[in-house]
Image (cartoon, rainbow, N blue to C red):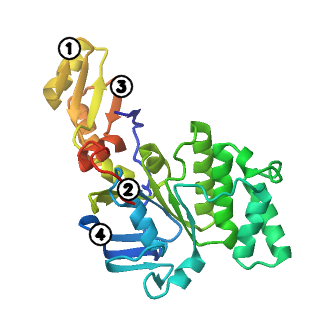
Amino acid sequence: MPSSVMPMSASGPRRGDGPQPPAAVSAVGLRKSYGDKTVLDGIDLSIPAGSVFALLGPNGSGKTTTVQILSTLIAADGGQAQVAGHDVATSPDGVRAAIGVTGQFSAVDGLITGEENMLLMADLHHLSRHEGRRTAAELLERFDLTEAARKPASAYSGGMKRRLDIAMTLVGSPRIIFLDEPTTGLDPRSRHNMWQIIRELVTGGVTVFLTTQYLEEADQLADRIAVLDDGRIAAEGTAEELKRLVPGGHVRLRFSDPSAYQGAALALRGTRDDDSLTLQIPSNGTQRELRAVLDHLDSAGIEADELTVHTPDLDDVFFALTGGTDQRKEDVR
């Protein structure tokens, strides 16, 4: 489990605190089946504009199906959904005009150059020749692809192809972008570069709907996270809220003075380690519980040499909420 030494001061606001902007994406009772296989079993979503929303889940949980319905690629069997204020069933053209989609598999054509891929997208968005070339040049520069622009895309590295893929998605200036496992197969450096691109998009006011199996990715990027399992939302909240759902968090106190250690053990009644003079007290990591520990120490006139807060991570949350494995089901869509 990750740990961090806590400063003896109040923490600042969490992501997600304060008034929420209007929903860019919303869904109520969304359902989808293929034959006798229920892929989505009545899910509800509400994603504020200008935020990153991450949908986590094992293979076959319905992540890609959710993206396909919200981006009007397939129709739901039941429920309602709105994207950018447009109903996905009755106003699909309005939805498509407001969104960009980067799927699990790259849409880049390897037989033509990066620049030609961009110009093709400009033509599909009915941009004028001048506007298309200007937009392509700006995006190629933004994604550090100018030097490679006239090389065949087949010669690009995985990270370069992914950057080009997202650059192509941005040609139409979408307000909402669906990224379906955008960093799968990328090396750590390319993955971190992609994270920076996503952060910059959100800073510019774009809403990002992200599906991923990289839990660190959701922890790093998402304002809110939903865990999808067997077609249902098992839990939703900020990363910190989800981590508090899983038991195992604790405060660890270390002492150099044996008498102080003994006094703390009597005052707090935690799990003792007499060899290392450490005391472990169950805690969900909230400010209130941490303050209670400190108040007990102050009342007893005891000072710890080190205080460390240990909290469950998103791996723990994922395994607890999805049954501990992602190999139980074959991904239907």
Q: How far apart are marks 4 and 2 (CA)?
A: 29 Å
Q: Which of 247 and 309 is in front in this view?
A: 247
Q: Which of labels 4 and 3 is toward the front?
A: 4
Crowdedness of circle 1 by 10 Å Cα count: few (<14), some, many (20+)? few
Callout 3 secondary element: strand
Give the spatial CA distance, label 3 vs label 1. 16 Å
Q: Where is residue 189 in the image (x, y as percent from the top left)?
A: 61, 38
**Which amino acid lies under the numbered mark 1 shown in the image of this protein?**
Asp
Alpha carbons under labels 4 and 1: distance apart: 57 Å
Q: Are discs 3 and 1 less than 8 Å apart at CB?
A: no
Disc number at residue 238?
Answer: 2
Whether the residues at callouts 1 and 2 have beta carbons within 8 Å, the answer is no
Residue most extreme to the top: 275
Which label's residue is closer to the chain start, 3 or 1? 1
**What secondary structure is marked by label 1?**
loop
Residue 55 against residue 10 in the figure, above or below = below
In the current view of this chain or complex, which residue is farthest to the right? 130
Q: Nearer the N terminus, badge 4 or badge 3?
A: 4
Mark seen at residue 274: 1
Q: Where does label 3 land, which residue?
A: 306
Nearest to viewer (mark 3 / mark 2): 2
Tag 2: amino acid: Thr
Residue appearing at x 23%, y 24% in the figure: 279
Q: How far apart are marks 1 and 2 (CA)?
A: 37 Å
Question: Could you say whether the residue bearing mark 2 is in a helix, strand or loop?
Answer: loop
Q: Which of marks 4 and 2 is nearer the N terminus?
A: 4
Mark nearest the camera among 1 and 2 is 2
N-terminal-most mark, 3 or 2: 2
